[in-house]
Amino acid sequence: MRIYLTGADGLLGSALTGALRENPRTAAWQVLGVSRGDFDIVDAAALRASVMGFVPDVVIHTAAHAIVDDCEADPKLALRVNVAGVCNVVDACRRVGSRLVYISTDYVFDGADTPAGGYRETDTPNPLNVYGLTKLAGERTSALLPDHLTIRTSWLFGGTDERVDAVLATVRQAERGERPQLIADQYSLPTYTEDLAQAIVFLLTRKRPVTGTIHVANMGTASWYEVGAHVLTVLDPELAATFEPVPVALDDCAYLGRRPRNSTLNTDRLAALGHIMPDWRDAVRRFCGRFGRADAGLLPVRAFDMRSS
């Protein structure tokens, strides 16, 4: 198999590159990862030349403009990257006969009246913000290709940039002795990029191609406040008992783009195929294992000088 991966240096792209390399079933696959350092996804000629030069069996399109308020502030840029960019990918796939795997988001739903068990793949999207609208447009464009696969996921964490990773941001704030302020009344499925990457490998290695739309996320609905409290417990239970995050209401946040109140995804289709995602608590524990505990001397002492605050 020959895999072409856009956004290879991003939050998911990095994890997926590692997962493909480490899994015995995919270790021999040829993987070409590209990122913005190679060319801009909106440069149709550059993308076409790159894809046609590699002739992949599958293109996995993870590249996107995913910062919600930046999309709201600059809709033209969001349209260029998240819509025109997808059009370029679809065109390149069509020229070489590649199958397309497109990564989408829970933000295609409005979260106003979440069905019991979460949104299913067949539920009607209704985005509240520019980001969600452009990602939905990308889904519709991807669906023009035969045997395409759209993977919707939610609330990714597991990267190296705290500006776009709420779990990492909580860890770093604890290290700096800052009390995290986290939204307590917005809910979805926090998803570890490593677990999402493993699920994508599972889907790619099925004897029969998985097509259409599928929801992939860690199990268990939570708010970022609940996630942050668990992060502190994992890092140091004593700290967590005396130094809880500050709960914040979604309506009190000065966001440019509206957020869905509860965008929980139903992952029954993935489970029926034979892949059960871990609970988000387990995923957070594994991610935080990278950072160690205070009593092991792996976190700065100043992080624990806030107990009297």
Image: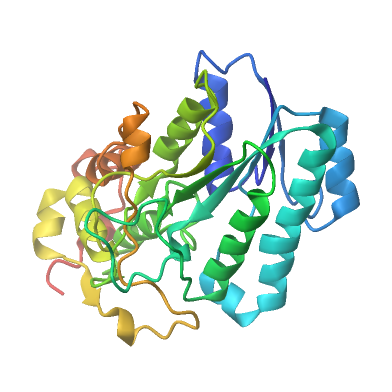
- Give the image quarter of residue 263: bottom left
Quadrant including the C terminus: bottom left
Q: Say how the picture is coloured.
A: rainbow
Residue 194 occupies which quadrant of the picture? Answer: top left
Seen in the picture, residue 254 relative to 83 is either above or below; the reply is: below
| Residue 53: x %, y % from top left | 88, 31
- Residue appearing at x 66%, y 78% in the figure: 74
Residue 65 in view: no
- Can I make out residue 89 in this image? yes
Q: How many labels does the image show?
A: 0
Does 9 sit above or below residue 85? above
For residue 88, above or below residue 212: below
In the foreground, 86 or 300: 86
At horizontal 34% and vertical 69% (from top left) the residue drawn is 111
**Residue 175 in the figure: left or right of residue 126:** left
**Along the line of sight, the residue nearer the viewer: 255 or 245:** 255
Compared to 211, does 124 lie above or below? Answer: below
What's the residue at 19%, 68% (across, down)?
Answer: 306
Residue 136 position within the rendered picture, expressed as x and y whole percent measured from the top left: 56, 62
Question: Where in the figure is residue 249, as x and y percent of width and height?
Answer: 26, 80
Quarter of the rendering occupied by the N terminus: top right
The picture places residue 27, in percent across and down from the top left corner, at 58, 16
In the image, taking residue 17 as reference, residue 116 lies left or right, namely left
